[in-house]
Amino acid sequence: MTEPTLTTERLHLRPLVPADAPSLFEVFRLPEVARWSGQGTPMVDVSEATTRIERAPGRAGDHPAAALFATERLDTGAFVGMTLLVPLPPSAGNERRVHEVGWHLHPDAWGHGFATEAATALVQRGFDAGMSGIFAVTDPDNVRSQAVCGRLGMTDLGLTTDWYDQELRAFRLDRG
Ligand SMILES: CC(C)(COP(=O)(O)OP(=O)(O)OC[C@H]1O[C@@H](n2cnc3c(N)ncnc32)[C@H](O)[C@@H]1OP(=O)(O)O)[C@@H](O)C(=O)NCCC(=O)NCCS
């Protein structure tokens, strides 16, 4: 059975709940975080974070390992951001059904290895639950995120329009 939460050496990952909205807003109101996801527009109101949390179960789909995770430090309990293991939205005409791992941290939490630590646990969770390969997609210019993919040992697949109906740099890690 897949547990709803994960604990790593320094982090606790648990499904987002409505009470996380103010913390999530503090992350996605920042241009340096928001520019790399969705429309690239910073949130301007906490209600946008509430909406994102409300939509999380639909975004995660029905795979038991998939979720959007509030990610917190074990030592202080601080909310460092959101990490995720969710279906990768295929572009029009792409029939492949795979999952992506992702990370969006508050800048105060950058430079500690937290994204790599959380993602390492998430890919293992996916593999343990039967996923054979897990993807990550990044804006072509998002060097920090691509560095996380490298630290995870992912294979760089180069630029592709297979996902999200836009050109992204994709990475894949295979089980075993
Ligand atoms: C992308 C993002 C998650 C990367 O965060 P990050 O902290 O740089 O990534 P990691 O968790 O892999 O940490 C690595 C850094 O921590 C340092 N570090 C410090 N202590 C460490 C430890 N105990 N273990 C590992 N690394 C450690 C590493 O040396 C490295 O530093 P460097 O960037 O100076 O080389 C972060 O920049 C972010 O949230 N950006 C905005 C949102 C975003 O782009 N999301 C991705 C969309 S595709």
Image: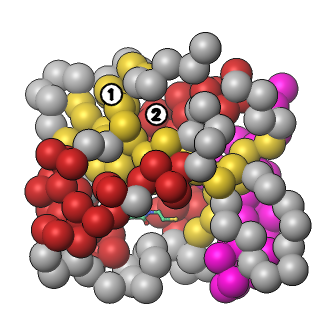
Residue type indicated by callout 2 = Glu
Which quadrant does the C terminus fall into?
top right
Mark 1 sits near ligand 1, with its Cβ under 8 Å away = no
Q: Can you identify the residue that label 1 sits on?
A: 11
As drawn, 164 above or below 72: below
Q: Amino acid at mark 1?
A: Leu
Q: What colour scheme governs how the chains and residues are painted in the rendered image of this protein?
A: secondary structure
| Residue 117 rendering spot, x and y as whole percentages | 46, 33
Q: Is mark 2 within 8 Å of ligand 1?
A: yes
Q: Are marks 2 and 1 in contact (CB under 8 Å)?
A: yes
Identify the magenta region.
149-176
Disc 1 secondary structure class: strand
Q: Quadrant of residue 129?
A: top right
Task: In the rendered view, tell whether residue 117 sits above or below residue 88.
Answer: above
**Which of pointers 2 and 1 lies earlier in the amino acid sequence?**
1
Residue 46 found in image quarter: bottom left
x 18%, y 55%: residue: 21
CA gap between label 2 and label 1 equals 8 Å
- Asked whether the viewer can see residue 116, the reply is no
Q: Is residue 165 visible?
A: yes
Magenta stretch encompasses residue 175: yes
Residue at 50% from the left image edge and 55% from the top image edge? 58
Give the x, y percent position of residue 13: 37, 31
- Decide whether residue 56 is among the magenta residues: no
* Residue 88: percent from left, percent from top: 67, 60
**Residue 168 image point, x, y percent:** 67, 77
Q: Residues within 10 Å of mark 2 (few under 14, many from 20)?
A: some
Q: Which residue is mark 2?
A: 117
State the residue at coordinates (72%, 65%). 170
Q: Secondary structure at mark 2?
A: helix
